[in-house]
Structure formats: structure tokens, C-alpha cells
Image (cartoon, helix red, strand yellow):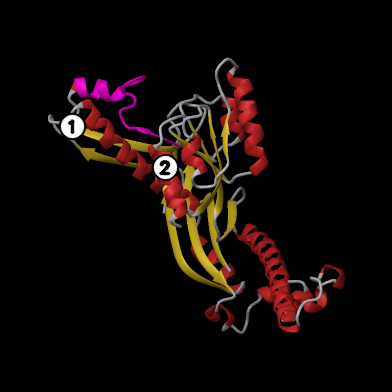
Amino acid sequence: MHYTLLIATQDSAGLVYKISRILYEAGANIERQDEYVDRENALFFMRTSFVVGSQKASENPTLESRADLPTDLAHDTDCTSHIDSSTKPPPLAPSAREGENREYAQNVQDSRLQDALESTLESKLKSVLPNGAKISLKKAGKKSLIILATKENHCLGDLLLRQESGELNAEIKAVIANRAELKSLVERFSIPFFWVDSDGISREEHEGKVGEIIERFSPDLLALAKYMRILSSDFTSRYEGKIINIHHSFLPAFIGANPYKQAFARGVKIIGATAHFVTNELDEGPIIAQDIIHINHTYSWQDMQKAGRDVEKSVFAHALDLVLHDRVFINGNKTIVF
């Protein structure tokens, strides 16, 4: 089983040693470890990728963690004895039945080991880390994602293609839009599309309807793929740290409609995009990723818009990839990205 451990805490001497030792004693094989110290605020950030159950980890003959697991879990290698017969699958051919039983037993064992490991690690880490330490243990796997959109298709279409090709470390559960134009695009990928018309109703009523759909799926993240609605503080607080937005990097210079026309009139020489977490402050949340491309006087505003859409797609996908792989810490109004 692959895990990622995220720790944010007050800085103090010996933290890397203490954390690494606890992981070693739990039978973990560390595959990658990144640390950063915010000296100005004396904060320590650490991201550790490790495996439990690999050959290298199992070669350690003195794993103290097994003594911390429940007795039946620490010593049994065959979980079949712990499965109630009423939960077993119906009679099958002998070979098929044996395969089903082995798979079911392995799933039970993995689940119980995971629960025991997480409980043991958290308690041990808390005992050696400063008070108030934030500890998060993530099991490797695809996260669930809901996309909010309006009518622009470049960011949404890029994410749909990335999921289709297996490049996106997420399962897109649904797309919610306040316009209907994107319905046919989304349905080509067999993903549920929900049109929640925003015309003629208050922002609170519209967000209430959107929120009801979101709660059906309980997603890990919300991605605003050029979602042209200003979210209320109630909505952003409800999904704090889970909403990612993309916009052009002309802000705050060129605000409002037709920013590319404004930029063209000003004669700008670069076009960029910014992906950030959404907070109560409009377009001012912690920045995850940015990029620019150079342009010149030969670009029309339409050329600039096309170039801007290309960079928005790549920056948005990159930011989501970082968050989906648990590489981002929020530190005040900034981020730490490993």
C-alpha cells in the first residue's frame, strides 16, 4: 500500500529523525521525502511518500508496529477465519470460489491493516510533534472531482481528455454549469452534466441548488473551469481548501469584460495564467501555479486570446495535478509546493 504523509508544524530540532524513525518502526519503506522550513514564521512542512507491505519493508525483522496492531491482525496471515460465512459469495465453481474468497480475504486484511496503521501512526506522531501539528495520511489512489463551468470549453475539454487518456489522477464525477452550451461536450465522455440556470434567481438560491448536487457526490475537490460566477463567502467557507480556480494573469491590471482587448490596447508583451485556491477574497487566494508566454506587436487581440487559452489549460491541469498528488500545502495566503 502506497501512502503520502503530510505534516505541518512548528519547527524544532530533530523532526525529520523522529518522523522517519516512527515510519521505519511501522514497517514503512520511504520512497521520497521533501522538507521545507518557513524561517520567518518558524514553520516546518514535510511530505513523505512511503510503502507498507513491500519486500524491503517486510525484510525488517524488528517491526515494532506489528506489536501495536490488534493481536489477530499482527500474527494472522490468513484472514479467512475472520470472515463471517454469511458475507461470503454464493457457491461457485471451486476455482472461482477460491479466487473470490482469496480476493475478499485480502481486501478485509488490507482494510484492517490500513485502519490500524493510520491509527497507530497518528498517535505516535502526535506524541513526538509539537502541539497543534497538522497530520494528514493519504492513501494512494484517484480522488473525486466535480467541475463547475459556464460556456467556455477549453479548460473543461482539456480535463475531460486527460481523464479519458488516464493522465488525470482523478475521477470526474460530474460537471455542473449555469449555462447549457457544454452539455453535448460533457455527455460525449459519459459524465453526468447538470445545468443549473442562474437566470432569475438569487445567488444564494443558485448556490443552494449547486450545493445539493455537489453533496450527492461528496467530491475531494471542485475545479472552476472558467466558471463565470462570483461565489459567496458561505460557499467558499463550506469548501475551504477544496476549490481551485483558473484565470488570466492580467488581473488586477485589466478587470472585467474583454481583458484581451484591454491588453491589446495597452500593448502588453506577455500573457499568463494563474491557478489558485478560492477564498473569500475574489481571485486573491493562495497561488498554486503560474506561467507566461511572450507575445509581440503582431498579435491581434484574438491571437492573444487564443494564446491565453492555451496557457490557461496547461496551468490549470498542472495545478490540479499537484493538488491531486498531495504536493501542496496552504501556508497563510501562500502555498508550499513539493
Q: Assess whether residue 207 is covered by the magenta stretch.
A: no
Regarding residue 39, the answer to whether it shows in the image is no
Q: Is residue 36 left or right of residue 110?
A: left
Judge from the rendering whether residue 141 lies leftward or rightward of residue 127; answer left or right.
Answer: left
Q: Residue at x 69, y 61 (%)?
A: 119
Identify residue type, mark 1: Lys
Q: What residue is shown at x 55% (from left), y 45% (from top)?
A: 191
Give the alpha-carbon distance from disc 2 to disc 1, as whole Å: 28 Å
On the image, numbered disc 1 is attached to which residue? Answer: 269
Q: Is residue 257 magenta?
A: yes
Q: Nearer the viewer, residue 14 or 300?
A: 300
Q: Reply above or below: 142 against 257.
A: below
Q: Secondary structure at mark 1?
A: loop
Q: Nearest to the eye among marks 2 and 1: give it.
A: 2
Which residue corresponds to the image point at 43% horizontal and 43% vertical from the top-left?
A: 335
Residue 157, which numbered label? Answer: 2
Q: Which residues are magenta?
A: 245-265
Using residue 31 as the reference point, say whether residue 82 is left or right of it.
Answer: right
